[in-house]
Amino acid sequence: MTQEATKTKATFPSVDWFNAVKEIVNNDENYKRIGTCDSVVGVKVPDLGKFYSLTFEAFEVADVREVSEGDAEDSDFWLEMSSERWKEMIQNISENGKADLHHTLNTIDLEDPDGLARSNDGYRRDAFYRFNQTFQYFFDASAQVDTTFS
């Protein structure tokens, strides 16, 4: 069976989309080889009024929830982009199997004057840098999801 035939269909942004990626990484032995990650990550798509919380515990993504904007900001850090910028990143990952050098979380963070990773606490924001490989692996796994956009 080809990879195309096995793709889960989901719309970004949605709990279903994040859960589809969660299922992929939680069943991927290579993900576990990255090492442990303990962090709560907010995801904000402000122009659509969509906010999520992703809980990474040890070697898995433990929880995905749609939350209020305040709850997304009450995380270690949150990733914030417009829906168009999220779409561009996710489509790039889908086309290439992983983010190219212009669409990694780290590059986007460096190029955005406000940063992609934001926090109300600099110490908690450090989790973005400490566990960056884990978060990039998570989003790169979305290449295996047949994504449509709101």
Image (cartoon, rainbow, N blue to C red):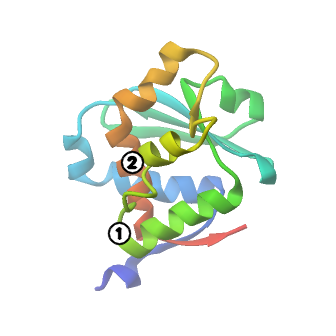
Residue 124, compared with residue 130, is above or below; it is: above
For residue 116, which quarter of the picture? top right
Q: Can you give x and y, in whole percent of width and height, for residue 21 in the image?
A: 46, 56
Name the amino acid type tagged 2. Answer: Gln
Query: Residue at position x 53%, y 16% from top?
Result: 122
| Residue that numbered label 2 is attached to | 136
Helix, strand or loop status at disc 2: helix
Query: Residue at position x 63%, y 41% from top?
Result: 65
Q: Can you give x and y, in whole percent of width and height, for residue 8 in the image?
A: 48, 71
Q: Residues within 10 Å of mark 1 (few under 14, many from 20)?
A: some
* Screen quadrant of the N terminus: bottom left
- Nearer to the camera, 79 or 108: 108
> Which label sits on residue 97?
1
Query: Residue at position x 42%, y 52% from top?
Result: 104
Query: Does residue 31 appear to the left or right of 11 in the view shown?
Result: left
* Screen quadrant of the C terminus: bottom right
Name the amino acid type tagged 1. Answer: Gly
Pointer 1 with pointer 2, Cβ within 8 A: no
Q: Can you give x and y, in whole percent of width and height, for residue 9 in the image?
A: 54, 73
